[in-house]
Amino acid sequence: MNPVRKYLKHKKGINTILASLLMVVIVVVASVMVYAWSTGLLGTLLVQPNVGKEALTMDTYAFPNNNNVTLTLRNAGTVAITFASYYVKNATGTTYTQSGYAWGPTIQPNTPGLTQVGITAGCGVCGSFSTSSFTFVSGNSYTVTLVTSRNNQFTFTVVR
């Protein structure tokens, strides 16, 4: 028998395989289109909560005495910022920690606010030093880290 006739004799089987393959491709394309449509529709129906963003910049600072620094901070975020604690670190690595900063200000969005940062130990609501106590000395650099009630940290460097 001629090889061409042999090939044409089994033509019916090849048509069945091609038809099945074409059906699989059509089903896959249709399911991708349904998935894209449904996620687009569900994405517009589901509303994401707006939690807001905290952003803080320092405008100025001043040292009224050797134990305090006054920071003028600007809230560049979309929610009010309330401080929960702060840390002051000197050049030698000694850290003053004020964990309960209950008298700290609340700064509204797009407004400036004054923040008093003190380094006094020994009173009932005062913080504590990591090793030895220090005061703000002229010419030295200090790192002030403010922690908000949302647990975001903002770090600023001040020089006396």
Image (tube, helix red, strand yellow):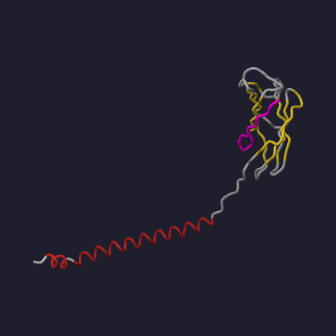
Location of residue 143 (image quadrant) = top right
- The answer to whether residue 78 is above or below residue 117 is below
Q: Residue furthest top?
A: 132
Q: Residue furthest right?
A: 64
- Give the x, y percent position of residue 34: 50, 71
Depth order, front residue of 139/93: 139
- The answer to whether residue 115 is above or below residue 38 is above
The stretch in magenta equals 147-160
Q: Residue furthest left?
A: 1
- The answer to whether residue 41 is above or below residue 66 is below
- Give the x, y percent position of residue 84: 76, 39
Q: Quadrant location of the C terminus?
A: top right
Magenta span has 148? yes
Location of residue 159 (image quadrant) = top right
At x 77% / y 26%, what residue is drawn? 128
At x 32% / y 73%, what residue is drawn? 20
- Give the x, y percent position of residue 86: 76, 35
At x 63% / y 67%, what residue is drawn? 45
Q: Quadrant location of the N terminus?
A: bottom left
At x 83% / y 38%, what residue is drawn? 71
Image position of 16 (left or right of 124): left
Magenta stretch, overall SS: strand
